[in-house]
Amino acid sequence: MKDFRTKAKQIEDMYNEINKTKIEELISIEAKRRAAELMMLKDGYKPKDSIVESVISQFKQRREVGIAKYGVTLDRKDLSTLDWINHAQQESMDFCLYLEKLKQEFTGNEIGLKEIKEKW
């Protein structure tokens, strides 16, 4: 029985050492990434395209809002291809409505407004 406990302890120690090493590697990778970012900022690094940087930032913010609101990411597996197509179609329809609203505000041609003006 003592031999079994010794082997079990050895296995547990090996497992803990492997996990410790993996965690240390991940921390090291993250530290190197952050250090590289800080060096770029320190050296006066400026994004090459502020528009692209802005869009990337907005995507990241949207991801966080989506996770907070729905509790899932787009990596979810509970939707079928048809479900994804329907979601995209609904988003596209909303997009068209937003564009129409902005177009009417910009031109002053709200639906019916032109005809009402002509009658008066």
Image (cartoon, rainbow, N blue to C red):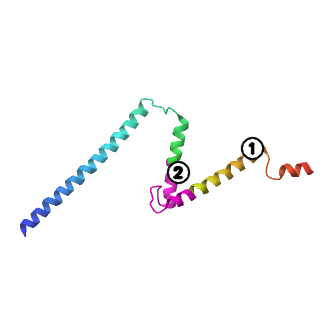
Callout 1: 10 Å neighbours few (<14), some, many (20+)? few
In the image: residue 21, left or right of residue 7 = right
Residue 27 x %, y %: 31, 46
Q: Amino acid at mark 1?
A: Phe
Give SS at disc 1: helix
Based on the picture, tell me whether residue 5 belongs to the magenta stretch: no
Based on the picture, tell me whether residue 74 belongs to the magenta stretch: yes
Quadrant including the N terminus? bottom left
Mark 1 sits on what residue? 106
Residue 109 x %, y %: 80, 47
* Rendered residue at 51%/39% (across/down): 53
Q: Earlier in the sequence, mark 1 or mark 2?
A: 2
Per the rendered image, the range of residues in magenta is: 60-86
Give the image quarter of residue 31.
top left
Q: Main secondary structure of the magenta part?
A: helix
Question: In this rendering, is residue 109 above or below 68?
Answer: above
Q: Amino acid at mark 2?
A: Arg
* Rendered residue at 88%/52% (across/down): 116
Mark 2 sits on what residue? 62
Residue 29 x %, y %: 32, 43
Front-most of residues 25 and 120 = 120
In the image: residue 55, left or right of residue 24 = right
Give SS at disc 2: helix
In the image: residue 8, left or right of residue 38 = left
Q: Residue furthest right?
A: 120
